Amino acid sequence: MVCTERAYAKLNLTLDILGKRPDGYHDLRMVMQSVDLFDEVSVETRETGGVTVRADLDYLPRNGDNLAVKAALAFFREAGVQPPGLHIQLKKRIPVCAGMAGGSSDGAAVLRALGRLYPMPREALERIGAAVGSDVPYCVRGGTALAEGRGEVLTDLPALPMCHIVLCKPDFPISTPELFRAVKPTRCHPDTAGMLAALKAGDLDGVAHRLYNVFEDFLPRRCQEVREIKSALLDLGALGAAMSGSGPTVFGIFREAGPAQEAAACLARRYRRTYTARPVGPA
């Protein structure tokens, strides 16, 4: 039997770091949004063979280091079921190491697929996801949500007003652990309350003006291009722009499709990983 799920990319409309926890993680407060840039994840049950994974990118791990495999094994542990033969096929569209939760979204899609094959409520899938990765519970749920704690404490929010989003990933990675080590106490924080109020009011301008990611304040000098892309998006007409997650992807929000497509075409001359997307609701 084969079950196929879309693994949607996520964006951080806000990202705030509240402090370090005794367990070594950080307490976060983030407003998250799914967009319709997605990987395609197929799960096929077989009689034998354990859990295997293949992707159309040869350099991705094919063992337990792949979050898709980790999620499958966590699901069967929770279900108290010996893992059957299970093959996972990934068709990647979300860039790797981009700050858009591509790996976490793949793992979440595996959990949703298995939850259909071996019925399990979404709340249980989110709980399993928390043991797989901090972004996985949100990726199981999708849509517009406030994420707190490590990212696993979720509150549904009113949907982001329909808009057009340009995403641009420069050709370098940013180390998430390095960024967390660079974070220092700061007086600059997202206006999370204002963001929640703008979403409740359906105020796209209010949302766009409150995009803010504290990681941007601690980027190493070699990542100056992130700021350059953000400035370019604003110059090209974006209502607001920010880096997603630990980067390096930068996104800008546009009200109309035409200006968004023109901005994407302009950025694509220099950055091959440039995309247009729209917000999507819960998975």
Image: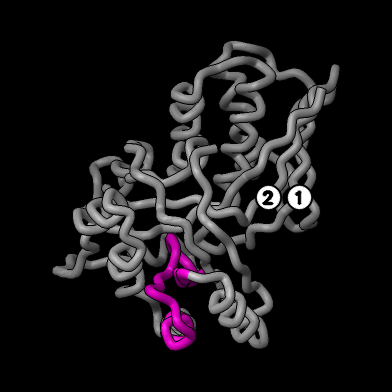
18 sits to left or right of 181: left
Magenta stretch: includes residue 252: yes
Residue 77 highlighted magenta (yes or no) = no
Q: Secondary structure at mark 2?
A: strand
Residue 59, quarter of picture:
bottom right
Check if mark 2's residue and mark 1's residue have beta carbons within 8 Å.
yes
Residue at (31, 46) in percent of width and height = 24
Residue 169 seen in the figure: no
Rendered location of residue 64, percent (x, y): 65, 38
Query: Which residue is rendered at x = 64% and y = 82% of the image?
Result: 265
Say left or right for 114 vs 233: right
Residue at x 43%, y 43% (from the top left corner) = 134
**Spatial distance from mark 2 to mark 1, Cα to Cα?**
6 Å
For disc 2, the neighbor class at 10 Å (few under 14, some 14 to 19, many from 20) is: many
* Residue 85 image offset from top left, x and y in percent: 79, 22
Query: What type is the residue that disc 1 sits on?
Result: Lys
Q: Is residue 185 visible?
A: yes
Q: Residue 136, how many percent across, how many down?
A: 49, 40
Q: Secondary structure at mark 1?
A: strand
Name the kind of residue labelled 2 in the image.
Asp
> Quadrant where the N terminus lies?
top right
Rendered image: mark on residue 152: none
Scheme by which the image is coloured: one colour
The residue wearing badge 1 is 91
Q: Is residue 82 above or below residue 61?
A: above
Give above or below for 18 relative to 187.
above
Looking at marks 2 and 1 on the same chain, the residue that comes earlier in the sequence is marked by 2
Picture layout, residue 81 above or below residue 199: above
Which residue appears at 14% of the width and 69% of the height? 187
Which range of residues does the magenta coloring cover? 230-255
Q: Which residue is mark 2?
A: 39
List x then y, in percent, for residue 43: 75, 32
